[in-house]
Amino acid sequence: MRTKKTTLRILAFILLLTSYFLLPTLSCSEVLDRIAAIVNNEVILQSEYEEALQAARKTEGNVSNDDVLEEMINRILLLEQARRLKLGTSADSGADADDEALVKEYVDRRIRALIHIPIEEIEAYYLKNRDRFGGKDFYEVEDEIENYFIEKGLEEKLLEHIKELRKKAYIRIQLDSG
């Protein structure tokens, strides 16, 4: 009976000694990057967010942190839709287009293509703003006016579309407040 107790004590001591040496190696893990946000199955890392924030501040100056994150989220949502529709893949090369081109193609096909500006609206704008066109004939500036209205309509439709995508998406923001 003594030998059994002694054996158990030795085993317990060895286990305790082993765990003592293993604990420091297990607890020395290092956080390489944090998650800033999760959008459906995509992750925005803190480092990606900070990089985008710095880039935005260089080009736009005074831009809010929230605006940058919201833009990143919107871009992911549009990119997911473009990939879902298998846009940007060439049958010849089999290569995927870069993300910016993919988003642009998606917006052009799914939103811009649905915007129609009646000729009467273009003419009415020309007549009201004739002095802006420096005496040019209507047919010389018709495309310019139409593009102006399309861009204006695109902005509104894109905001509506993103709003709908956001309603259906899982979005979790996990930014540190400090």
Image (cartoon, rainbow, N blue to C red):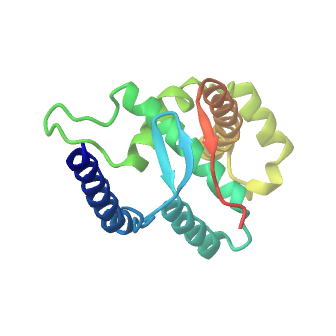
Q: Quick one: quadrant of the C terminus?
A: bottom right
Q: Is residue 7 above or below residue 164?
A: below
Foreground of the two, 55 or 107: 55
Q: Where's residue 9, x and y in %?
A: 30, 54
- Please tell me which residue is depicted at 49% across the width and 65% down the height of the picture: 47
Q: Where's residue 120, x and y in %?
A: 74, 26
**Residue sitting farthest toward the left:** 92
**Residue sitting farthest toward the front:** 1
Q: Quadrant of residue 172?
A: top right
Res. 147 in view: no
- Left or right of residue 52: residue 88: left
Q: Where's residue 76, x and y in %?
A: 50, 42
- Please tell me which residue is depicted at 73% across the width and 63% down the height of the picture: 64
Q: Quick one: quadrant of the N terminus?
A: top left
Q: Quadrant of residue 138?
A: top right
- Please tell me which residue is depicted at 14% across the width and 40% down the height of the picture: 93
Q: Where's residue 44, x and y in %?
A: 50, 51
- Left or right of residue 32: residue 37: right
- Left or right of residue 23: residue 45: right
